[in-house]
Image: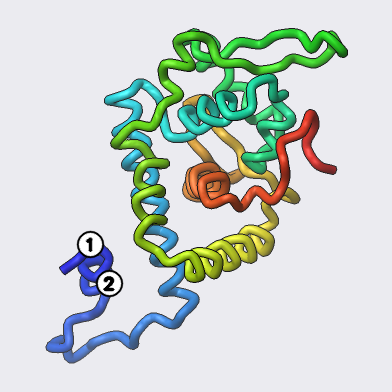
Amino acid sequence: MGPLKELHAASVPCAANENEAAPLDEVMEFLRLLWAVDQGLRSTSKFMETTMGLTGPQRLVVRLVGQYPGITAGGLAEILHVHPSTLTGVMKRLQKRGLVERRSDPLDARKALLFLTDAGRAMNVPSDGTVEAAVKRALSRVPKARLECARDVLTALAEELGVGNAPLSLDDHGEGAAPGDDTAGVVAAGLVPALGLAGTRPGTEPAP
């Protein structure tokens, strides 16, 4: 039995139980699966911190800066759907570790451009045991048509939850959290860019 089938089976009340509850409706079932993804992301993020020294969101920032050298904090925040100020803790940790550096924009000294250092570039390589590696394996098993449907659903959900209107935050440890909660941010920070759901090209400032 595959992991997902095991997960589903574990959630179904035993038929022998005379007080068996009614099956979950589609909304509750979808929320249950989102919760499972969130917990998996958190677990993988902690594993990454232990083995690589980077949490999932921190590594995501490294990968994005590596893909878009010279990006501003505003452009990075735009991709991650967070306010630029919420990246402060993550960036300080990455700079302290010597993975990311800031350089003044030659065209506007008020702006800082982000680049990977040599150490950062050494970390910016595909690696097993990471969130993106798990996402890549999962996507390879899903037909393209079904993947497009999944993107549509997650995009609609992000819109309903107000991503961009009520930005998620990243705490000092680089973990994601919605204001007043700590369960949604890693999902948004890990899955939205990985699935190509950002919907915008990185710019110099966040979209209005």
Residue 126 pos. (x, y %) = 38, 32
Q: Quadrant of residue 56?
A: top left
Looking at the image, residue 114 sits to the left or right of residue 28; the answer is right
Q: Quadrant of the N terminus?
A: bottom left
User: What residue is shown with label 2?
Assistant: 8
Q: CA distance from mark 1 to mark 2?
A: 9 Å
The nearer-to-camera label among 1 and 2 is 1
Residue at x 70% of width, y 27% of height: 85
Report if residue 181 is visible in the image. no
Q: Quadrant of the C terminus?
A: top right
Density class for disc 2 (Cα within 10 Å; few <14, some 14-19, many ≥20) is few
Instruction: Look at the numbered disc 2 and give the secondary structure of its residue.
Output: helix
Q: Quadrant of residue 159?
A: bottom right
Q: Is residue 103 above or below residue 194?
A: above
Report if residue 159 is visible in the image. yes
Q: Amino acid at mark 1?
A: Pro
User: What residue is shown with label 1?
Assistant: 3
Q: Earlier in the sequence, mark 1 or mark 2?
A: 1
Residue 124 versus residue 80: which sits nearer the camera? 124
Looking at the image, residue 109 sits to the left or right of residue 112; the answer is right
Residue 132 pos. (x, y %) = 42, 41
Instruction: Look at the numbered disc 1 and give the secondary structure of its residue.
Output: helix
